[in-house]
């Protein structure tokens, strides 16, 4: 089958090509999918999308009119896809329900450690041969109280690393994870977790119930010197409220791999024209804030697993099968 993949990163391209070589004709584009770029897919029965593509009803309509039958999303998240519109248009939609949770958990810890020990500021100074230690004092992770918001596969991996550091673990989720309980995690209400934790890491999906889970009220409950890390979904954090919290001199570190308005910004080079998002621009002026561009998943292991699952989704579709990754039509497989 003819496959058109949108939003393909340079490091991802050879892995995609190898996965489909000899079986399907693959065309990989670095442009992202939206209404303007959807006509490029005309004649391709399979479109492979990325998490920052915009698959609204309008875009899906263009794809369907051009002959696309399958949307194979290369991510676990799918809030960028209008599933109801896809169903009405007769499109099949599949995602990747699993890839290495260690990739995201390790990146979350990289952010936490970097902001705690002021590594970005230290590295920038060293490049200018300024080797002073002023303003670089961090804290021991050992002995900290670490709050894990969401203790699924990724949250569990984050907790295991935290346990290795010798921390006290607090957890919040709809149900306790027995593996986290074995680590000594204490499950508490969200407000208690926020108020007691020195370091808080978010690992819940973005749902209506979790949108702006960390809002002004939640931030007000947190300790003044707390560290906040989000490597899950940008919409979990009310960024405007976060900026106001930082402006008031609170929070000793913030590490973000996601941002609620990242579409059209992350994965692009904006170094020449800059950005017109005043909230993001203001956020990045704070010295204790570190922002990376949705790269927590971006390891060879995880990307390889994502591509393998995407290839299986396409092979199953070709054979007339659904699997556990199929979103539309819904399946209980």
Image: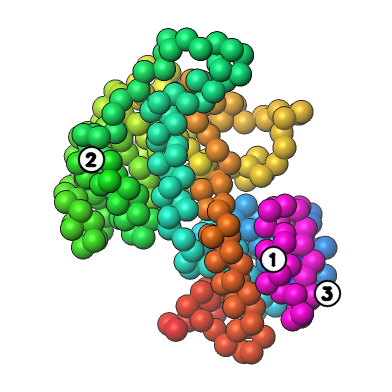
**How far apart are the alpha carbons under marks 3 and 2?**
55 Å
Task: State the residue at coordinates (49%, 63%).
Answer: 99
Residue 254 image offset from top left, x and y in percent = 42, 31
Q: Quadrant of the N terminus?
A: bottom right
In the drawing, what numbered circle is on residue 167?
2
In the drawing, what numbered circle is on residue 301?
none
Residue 178 image offset from top left, x and y in percent = 21, 63
Magenta span contains residue 15: yes
Of 6 and 155, the residue lying toward us:
155
Residue 218 image offset from top left, x and y in percent = 30, 35
First of labels 1, 3 by sequence position: 1
Residue tagged 3: 43
Task: State the residue at coordinates (56%, 30%).
Answer: 280
Say whether residue 120 is left or right of residue 69: left
Residue 65 image offset from top left, x and y in percent = 78, 73
Residue bounds of the magenta highlight: 5-33
Residue 220 seen in render: no
Count of picture labels:
3
Where residue 154 sits, quadrant-wise, is bottom left
In the drawing, what numbered circle is on residue 16?
1
């Amino acid at each position: 089958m003819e496959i058109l993949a949108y939003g393909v990163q340079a490091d991802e391209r050879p892995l995609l090509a190898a996965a489909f070589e000899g079986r399907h004709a693959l065309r990989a584009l670095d442009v992202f999918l939206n209404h303007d770029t959807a006509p490029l897919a005309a004649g391709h029965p399979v479109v492979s999308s990325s998490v920052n593509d915009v698959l609204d009803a309008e875009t899906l309509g263009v794809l369907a009119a051009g002959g696309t039958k399958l949307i194979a999303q290369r991510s676990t998240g799918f809030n960028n896809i209008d599933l109801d519109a896809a169903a009405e248009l007769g499109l099949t939609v599949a995602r990747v329900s699993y890839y290495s949770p260690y990739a995201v958990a390790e990146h979350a810890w990289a952010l936490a450690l970097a902001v705690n020990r002021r590594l970005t500021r230290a590295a920038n100074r060293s490049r200018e041969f300024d080797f002073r230690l002023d303003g670089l004092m961090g804290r021991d992770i050992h002995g900290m109280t670490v709050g894990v918001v969401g203790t699924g596969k990724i949250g569990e991996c984050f907790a295991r690393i935290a346990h290795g550091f010798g921390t006290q673990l607090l957890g919040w989720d709809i149900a306790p994870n027995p593996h986290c309980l074995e680590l000594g995690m204490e499950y508490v209400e969200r407000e208690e977790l926020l108020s007691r934790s020195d370091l808080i890491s978010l690992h819940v999906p973005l749902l209506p119930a979790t949108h702006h889970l960390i809002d002004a009220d939640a931030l007000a409950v947190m300790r003044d010197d707390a560290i906040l890390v989000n490597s899950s979904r940008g919409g979990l954090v009310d960024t405007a409220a976060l900026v106001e919290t930082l402006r008031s001199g609170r929070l000793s570190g913030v590490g973000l791999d996601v941002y609620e308005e990242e579409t059209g910004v992350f994965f692009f080079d904006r170094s020449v024209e800059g950005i017109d998002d005043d909230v993001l621009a203001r956020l990045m002026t704070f010295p204790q804030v570190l922002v990376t561009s949705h790269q927590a998943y971006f390891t060879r292991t995880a990307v390889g697993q994502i591509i393998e699952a995407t290839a299986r989704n396409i092979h199953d579709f070709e054979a007339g099968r659904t699997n556990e990754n199929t979103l539309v039509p819904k399946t209980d497989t």
